[in-house]
Every structure is written in C-alpha cells, then in structure tokens.
DNA sequence: TCTGGGGTCCTAGGACCC
DNA sequence: TCTGGGGTCCTAGGACCC
C-alpha cells in the first residue's frame, strides 16, 4: 500500500520586498522590512503599482497591485523602492538551490515559490522538523524568511503556506481540512478569484466548507463543468496532481506597454507597437522559437480589452513579419481615434522547427529583415554585457 | 486613488466537412 | 425544398496565477 505523500510548498515572505531589503542592508542601509515600505516599478511613473509590501505597510491597509499613489495616500511616510530584477533572479536561484538539497523532486511555481515532494526522504522523520530546518537554513544563509506549508498534496501544502506569516511552518493534512481550511473565506481557496467569489457568494457559498458541501451539479451551473469539478475536489482537500520537475516549454510570448497618459495618435500607437514587436521577436529568437500565430490587443481607458489574433502561413521569428501582421490587425480593431491606455503584442503556436522556406514567392526583403534582426540581437547582447559588468562592479 | 507585466487554461460560437 | 448530428479548427473573450 502506498503511504501518504508529503509535499512542501515553500513561499518567500513578501519576496521582492525581502530581497530588496537584503540588497539594501548589504550596502549598510536599514532593514526596510521593519517599516512601512513597498517595492514598485518606476516610482516616478504615476501609473506604477505596488509589487510587494512590507508587513508594517500591509498593516496600514496597503495591498499588492494597488497604485503607488494610493498607497502613499494611506501612508505618507511610505518608503518606495524600485525593484531590481537581476538581483531577484539571483535570490531565486539561491532559494531553489537550498530547497533542492532537501528533495530533487522540485517544481518551481513562480520566481518565489516552489513545491518539493518529500514523500521518500521524509520516511520515519517528522516533516515539521525537516521543514523548520529548511526554513532556518534559508534564513541563515540568504537573509530572508520563507513560509513552509506541509500537506499530503500540492493544494494542501500551498494553502498551508498561506497561514500565519512570516517565517512559519504549518501543516494541512487531509484530516485537518475540516478544522483549518473549511472555516476560511471561499476567496482564500486557490483558483477562486474575484469573479468566482462573487458568483459563489450570490448563491450563499461563503466559506470553503460551504463549497465542499455543494454538489458538482449545482456548481456546474455557476462556473462550468470542468471548473466545478476542480473546485469541489479542492474544497474537499483533494488534488492528485504531481510535482513536475520538467520546466514546461513556453506556449506564448508577449509584451505590452502602458502609456503614462492615454494616447491616441496613430504615430504614437505605431511606435509602441514597433517597440513591443522588437522585444517579442527578440525573445522568440533567443529561445530559438518560431511562431505561427500573432496577436495584438489594446486596452481602452475603461480597461476594456479588444484583441485580434491571426495565423500566419509560415512560422517566423522575423520582427518585420510579426509587426506587419500586428499592424494589419490593429487597423481592424482600432477606430483610429479613441484614446488607448495600453497596447500589446503576442506570439503563440511556437515551434523549434526552422523550416527554411523554399517558396518562389518569398519576399526578397526577408533577407534585409533578417540582417536587421541580427544586428538588433547583437546590439542588445552588447548592451546586456555592459550592464552585467557594471552590476558586478557595483556589487564588489 | 485610479489601477503593471507576463503567463496559462477554459469556453462559446462560427466555419466547414462528412 | 428543407434538413440531423458529430467532429475539428479557429477566434474572441474571460477567468485565474504571481
């Protein structure tokens, strides 16, 4: 008989904020975790939002993803720091490396979260003690804290890591579901977002326990068959998905730009579209992909989004080809006048096949486009090298 | 106060074919 | 002249995650 699984979910507490705090402290600055502080994008952009908030900031009602301007209103003395992605990547690597020592069966869930399957390693040992060692090792070596959630499946482990923070270990075994999970607000359940919460509450489903008690049939009318079945399983603490060690290949690549003031002229929109096309195509080439579907979308002032996508005859990684498709579709969806808040471009249906097209009708300009892209990639690489060099110097 | 950026998956409806 | 049912592919939109 298979004994029960033991899964850990490890979650860095206020990741970007903690990581920034560690970075600042290395430069002799005080610990921003102890005061109201947030990490944001460009703090000077009035549209930038809170990426991570310290616990004192959260106590003042500041929430992740709210505009920085709003957070400043709640807390005029708030410290606002710009995030440093290169540093975060390094912190993430260090964090995963330590976790992997506890179990090689590791699935990265995001930059600051992972699952590890401890079923084999933990045999005969108290999982809580092992988790405490793991959490302390991360704290002592890397200088930031994590929560470890322990459960008999990924869902329970993940839910457990959300309990009291920071620097804590919690269990949520199947037999604890009724006591620890059912009283929680239904919104706390993984995959229950704002819209689903509204629907469920309209039907009197307020807690995870309420959800667990409903039939799949009654839930299906609310959220569709597949999602209903999943919600019902999860609310009852069941989840048979396994810890996937393989990193899945990307299915799409996209980029978008939000203008600091809603803009409207065709020229401005086209410039933004050109910029995102360069970014997307560059990332496509760097990952050695070709794409056969291009999509473009715009977001209006009222946040409504309109999108068009189109298949192209030959998979491509050429900026100009992608841009031309996007331009044509943009003309389809934009009236040419309405102010636009955001414009985005994506590619999907990605393949690694590099089918050299032998068509007689191949556009003779393609060679020119390819050369243009090659130079773009080269300049980008040089720029990145220079940045990395400057970064390493600064660190010493 | 005025809402980023980057992803995944699901569903519904239309076109088209047999 | 009017008509069923099923399958596949595609697009648009919407939900969720961090």
Image (cartoon, coloured by chain):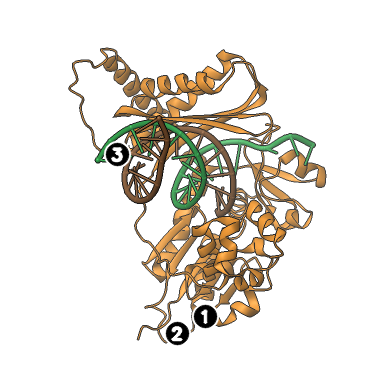
Chain colours: A orange, B green, C brown
Q: How many marks?
A: 3
Residue A125 is marked as 2
Q: Which of A188 and A22 is in front in this view?
A: A188
Is label 1 in contact with label 2 (beta carbons under 8 Å)?
Answer: yes
In the image, residue A313 sits, relative to residue A12, either above or below, namely: above
Same chain? Circles 3 and 2: yes
Which SS class for mark 3?
strand
Question: Do we see residue A76 in this rendering?
Answer: no
Cα distance, mark 1 to mark 3? 45 Å
Which SS class for mark 1?
helix
In the image, residue A306 sits, relative to residue A193, either above or below, namely: above
Q: Which residue appears at 57% of the width and 14% of the height? A: A266
Q: Nearer the viewer, residue A59 or A339?
A: A339
The spot of residue A24 in percent (x, y) is: 62, 48
Marked residue chain, label 2? A
Q: Give whichever of discs 3 and 2 has the lower sequence position.
A: 2
Same chain? Circles 1 and 2: yes
Report whether A67 appears left or right of A144.
right
Which residue is labeled 1 in the image?
A: A129
Mark in front: 3 vs 2: 3
Marked residue chain, label 1? A
Q: Which residue appears at 65% of the width and 51% of the height? A: A195
The quadrant the N terminus of chain A occupies is: bottom left
Q: Give whichever of discs 1 and 3 has the lower sequence position.
A: 1
The image quadrant of residue C10 is: top left
Which SS class for mark 2?
loop
Which residue is labeled 3 in the image?
A: A351
In the image, residue C4 sits, relative to residue A366, either above or below, namely: below
Q: Is disc 3 surrounded by few (<14), some (14 to 19) or many (20+) residues within 10 Å?
A: some
Report whether A162 appears left or right of B16.
right
The spot of residue A13 in percent (x, y) is: 60, 60
Report whether A136 appears left or right of C4.
right
């Amino acid at each position: 008989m298979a004994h029960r699984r033991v899964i850990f979910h490890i979650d860095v507490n206020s990741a970007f904020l903690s990581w920034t705090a560690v970075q600042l402290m290395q430069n002799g600055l005080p610990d921003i975790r102890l005061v109201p502080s947030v990490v944001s994008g460009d703090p000077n952009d009035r549209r930038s939002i809170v990426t991570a908030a310290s616990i004192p900031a959260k106590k003042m009602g500041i929430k992740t993803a709210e505009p920085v301007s709003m957070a400043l209103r709640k807390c005029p003395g708030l410290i606002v720091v710009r995030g440093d992605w290169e540093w975060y990547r390094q912190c993430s690597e260090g964090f995963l490396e330590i976790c992997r020592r506890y179990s090689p069966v590791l699935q990265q869930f995001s930059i600051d979260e992972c699952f590890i399957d401890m079923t084999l390693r933990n045999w005969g040992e108290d999982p809580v003690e092992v988790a405490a060692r793991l959490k302390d090792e991360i704290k002592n070596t890397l200088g930031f804290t994590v929560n470890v959630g322990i459960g008999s499946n990924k869902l329970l482990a993940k839910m457990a890591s959300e309990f009291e923070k920071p620097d804590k270990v919690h269990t949520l075994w199947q037999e604890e579901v009724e006591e620890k999970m059912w009283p929680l607000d239904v919104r706390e359940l993984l995959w229950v977002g704002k819209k689903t919460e509204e629907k469920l509450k309209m039907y009197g489903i307020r807690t995870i326990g309420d959800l667990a008690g409903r039939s799949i049939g009654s839930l299906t009318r609310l959220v569709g068959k597949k999602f209903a079945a999943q919600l019902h399983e999860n609310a009852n603490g069941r989840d048979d998905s396994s810890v996937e060690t393989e990193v899945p290949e990307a299915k799409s690549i996209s980029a978008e730009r939000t203008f600091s003031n809603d803009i409207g002229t065709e020229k401005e929109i086209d410039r933004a579209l050109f910029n995102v096309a360069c970014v997307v195509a560059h990332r496509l080439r760097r990952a050695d992909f070709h794409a056969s579907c291009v999509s473009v979308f715009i977001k209006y002032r009222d946040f409504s989004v309109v999108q068009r996508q189109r298949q192209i005859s030959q998979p491509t990684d050429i900026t100009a080809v992608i841009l031309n498709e996007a331009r044509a579709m943009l003309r389809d969806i934009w009236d040419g006048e309405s102010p636009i808040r955001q414009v985005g471009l994506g590619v999907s249906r990605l393949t690694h096949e590099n089918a050299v097209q032998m068509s007689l009708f191949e556009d003779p300009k393609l060679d020119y486009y390819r050369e243009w892209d090659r130079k773009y990639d080269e300049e980008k690489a040089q720029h990145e090298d220079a940045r990395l060099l400057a970064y390493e110097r600064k660190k010493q």
